[in-house]
Image: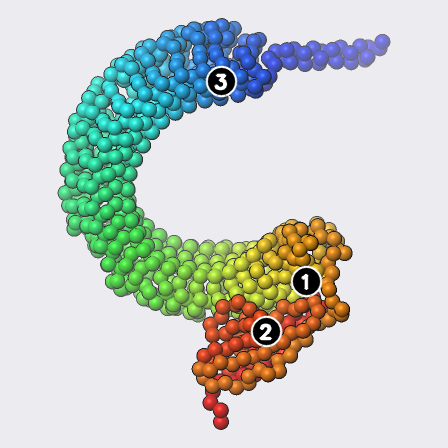
Amino acid sequence: MTRAMKLSCFLLVAVAACMLHESSACPMYCTCNDVGKDEVAVYCRGPKIRAIPRDIPDNTTLLEISSTELTVLRRGDFVDMPMLTQLNVGSNLKLSAVEPGTFDNLQTLTDLRLSNNSFTKLPAGLLDSLKNLTNFDCRNNKLVMIQRGLFTDHPSLQIIRVDFGNIAVLEEAAFSGLPHLSSVYVGSNRLTSLTSSAFKGSPELKSLYASGNSITAISKDAFTDTSFETLYLTRNAINIVEVEALSPLRNLQRIYLDENNIENLEGVFRDLPQLLSVNLSNNKLTSIERVFRNLPKLSSLSFNDNRISKITNSTFNGVPALESLSIANNNMYEVESGTFRKLDRLVALYMDYNQIEEISLIGLHALRSLSINYNNLHSFPTDLNDANLLEALYLNNNPIEEPLEEQFSALHRLSTLYLSNITCLKGTLNSKALCGLGALKELWLSFNELSTLPPSTFQNTTAISTMWLQNNNLTELSTGLFHGLTELNQLDLSYNQLSHLDPDTFLGLDKLRILILTGNNFTNMAHVAPALASLPSQVALNLKENPFVYLGRESFKVPIKHANILSMSRSHIRVIEEGTFMYETFSNLTTLELDQNDFLHFLPGNMLDGLDNLTAMIAHDDPFHCDCQLKAFVTWLRERVNPPYVSATCASPPSLKGKDLTDVPLASLTCDCQQVEVPSIDTSGSDNFTREGQTAMLNCKVSGCPEAEFFWTTPTGAMLAVESGFPRMEVLDSGTLVVTDAREEDTGVYTCTAVNYRGKASKEVALHVGNRH
């Protein structure tokens, strides 16, 4: 054997020996990971484990045993682990018992976690030998009590978690004599009361988490000889807090009493020099008079979801440092003048969902945010000059009748203004309404039945980045309305009555990224596209729920190069012609959404050809009739290298219903025609004249096979089909256009167009409305 061969054999033996050593060092059903120099973390999991694994490496610092069939932890289970600092025996649903002395050999343990098991009791003295233990976590078990001697007099424990169990009793001295204990978690158990005897003699105990129990009262001796700084008592059944209950807590900083049944707190909160925050939301308070006295540091108060009907100019006399006040969703109908006069540090005031009719902001010199949505205000807040540091003002859904002129002119820092569903804004907006708001960035003017906006409406608010104008009655947008809004990023014009946009509507909006035009009255894409073409940035165009019926080459005469998403879902599209979507028009389009168009039955063969960046066309829930009219499109999909994702299925015939287009055999895409032909149109018998106020019938009888889709174009360029829902004009299934209550402006040439995959036919009908001469 050569020297090289001997060396190779030696290396193979050495590697094999190392592998054998590593595999034997880690117990079966366990994973051992190096976590530091000469330190190992061991994870033992699975139902095959029925006893604590032996031969745990002696340099293990973390041991986790979870999701096993263990039923009991025994003395001697944890030995020869001189470096173990963290032990996690959790999520073992059959584990219900632990023997005394089980952990006695773990002298280095600092973190013991026994959560998510089924323990009903832990023996006294269980932790006595763990002199370095700082964290004990036994949450989500079935413990029924914490007896004296389990934690009592432990020298190092800092955090104890026994929440989410069935604990009904804390024995006397349960948490006493622990010199380093800082936090106790007993929430989500079955406690009905708290007594100080359970916590006495633990001078560093600052936080008690007792939410989600069944505590009914806080007695005057509940916290005697304790030093709590934070009390969590949320979601109990507390109906009484005795007057002296909090008096011993001279260092109390935060108390959470929300979601209880408290009706009266008179005299409870007084002479607490360190108190910072009180949450009393979701109770049954009807008054908060004479509740707060001598609380020099209190900065946050919350009374949401109570029954408070009134606040007066003496309600908050004892809280001079208050910064945040929330009294939303009460029965409040009156805010007495001068109520906030002494709250010159108040930064945020929330009073939504009340019945307040008027409010004065006198004295609120530091106020930054005011929310008073859903009230009964009949006028705008008064003394706004005192609140001239306001940055956010929310006044949605108020029956304010006072005309909006220049009331906000002193609010030079205002960046957010919500004015939706305001009575005085019905119809139009005063051109001076937004004067002085040069810092405004976010504006809501939705649900106001606005029909017009003066051209100068936004000339003084050029910093606006987000604007909501949805759910109004806008029929047109004044020329230059948005000019100068160079920071505008999102514009929502959905659910108005727009049918036409001037080509310069969005000129200069270089930062616009989201444009929402959903739910308007656009029927002809040619009336919209030129305005969209002026957008220079990558933009998502939302044109959903508009009554478009036709898309063709003439729909996009100007390139819309910066659109990356075009959504026309839930429209009335019946016809998409070849050449509609070309690279020259949509060079950056990545997503085309045509889904839920109830009348779209077929697609042209090369419809998507040339859209090199397109990754997806969404057309699910469209009623595609899988016949010869779709054959060219399906063929293109199959022959294309790396085609875009297309979501589309057959709605008919019954034999193909539900099939994905890409799964339909080409041989199945046939039409039952004796002769395939371009459609033809017969308009004979149409009315060419009608008197004003009368009805005109314009006929369009379409023939040809396969059956064509048809639509009418009016003299104004509106495109209509069956169920378009256009005022005074209805297209019947027969093809006839019915013009009711005819008017002089209806005079002109109407064009009926029919399209199938073989071609297109059009015929004109001239209609004159007036008096016959």
| Residue located 39% across and 63% down the image | 472
Amino acid, disc 2: Gly
Q: Secondary structure at mark 3?
A: loop
Left or right: 308, with 163 as reference point? left
Question: With respect to residue 316, does 184 lie above or below?
Answer: above
Residue hosting label 2: 735
* Disc with the residue nearer the chain's start (1 vs 3): 3
Please tell me the numbered disc located at residue 450. none
* Disc with the residue nearer the chain's start (1 vs 2): 1
Of 347 and 474, nearer the camera is 474
| Res. 554 image quadrant | bottom right
Residue lying farthest to the right in this orientation: 1
Specify few, some or many for label 2: CA neighbours under 10 Å numbering under 14, 14-19, or 20 or more: many
Please state which of the two labelled residues, at mark 1 or mark 3, is closer to the viewer. 3
Please tell me the numbered disc located at residue 604. 1
* Disc with the residue nearer the chain's start (3 vs 2): 3
Residue 477 seen: no
Left or right: 329, with 601 as reference point? left
Residue hosting label 3: 94
Task: Tell me where residue 549 appears, x and y as whole percent.
Answer: 57, 66
